[in-house]
Amino acid sequence: WKTCGDDGCTHDYCDEYEVKSAAAAMKANGMKDAGYNYVNLDDCWAYGRDETGTFTWDSDRFPSGMPSLIDWLHDEGFKFGLYTSAGNETCSNGGRDGLHVPGSEGYFTEDVQTFASWGVDYIKL
């Protein structure tokens, strides 16, 4: 399951409730048992960088935080992936007007370390 549709970068919205609901539905309808065990987020998760340059998630959309969500997904038997841009900004603001979501340009090592500390299994770049 992924948050971004097949319409390019025109729509990408997600939040903690939607992600957990989609994962629960995948378990209930047998998709997970059939091998569909990845939950991947595109532009919708990120918000910016903190004062040390570390990626921050959108705390309105993910109030429990990304590490907590990822732990929950792992406990449910899913793997977790997320998207970051190789450039300085992603292609979408995830439906948040005026927000410029940073990419990983200049922060590749820091971002990989951050994602690993959260428990990310897959990075779409």
Image (tube, rainbow, N blue to C red):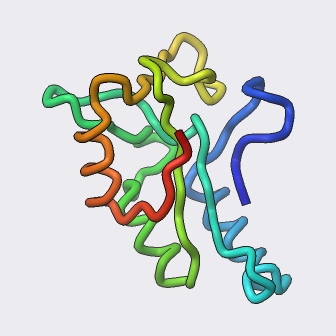
Q: Residue furthest top?
A: 98
Q: Is residue 29 above or below residue 60?
A: below
Q: Quadrant of the N terminus?
A: bottom right
Residue beneath the point at 46% across and 40% down: 60
Q: Number of callouts in the render? A: 0
> Can you give x and y, in whole percent of width and height, for residue 86 in the image?
47, 28
Q: State the image coordinates of residue 95 (x, y, percent, origin top left).
A: 65, 26
Q: Report the residue at 64% width, 45% height from top.
A: 14
Residue 53 image offset from top left, x and y in percent: 21, 29
Q: Position of residue 124 (x, y in %)?
A: 55, 45
Q: Residue at x 48, y 83 (%)?
A: 75
Residue drawn 79% across the image and 28% down it: 8
Which is more toward the observer, 106 or 78? 106
- Please determine whether, in this image, residue 73 is positioned above or below residue 104: below
Q: Is residue 8 above or below residue 4?
A: above
Q: To which quarter of the image does residue 17 belong?
A: bottom right
Front position in the image: 106 or 38: 106
Given the current orientation, which residue lies at the most extreme left position? Answer: 52
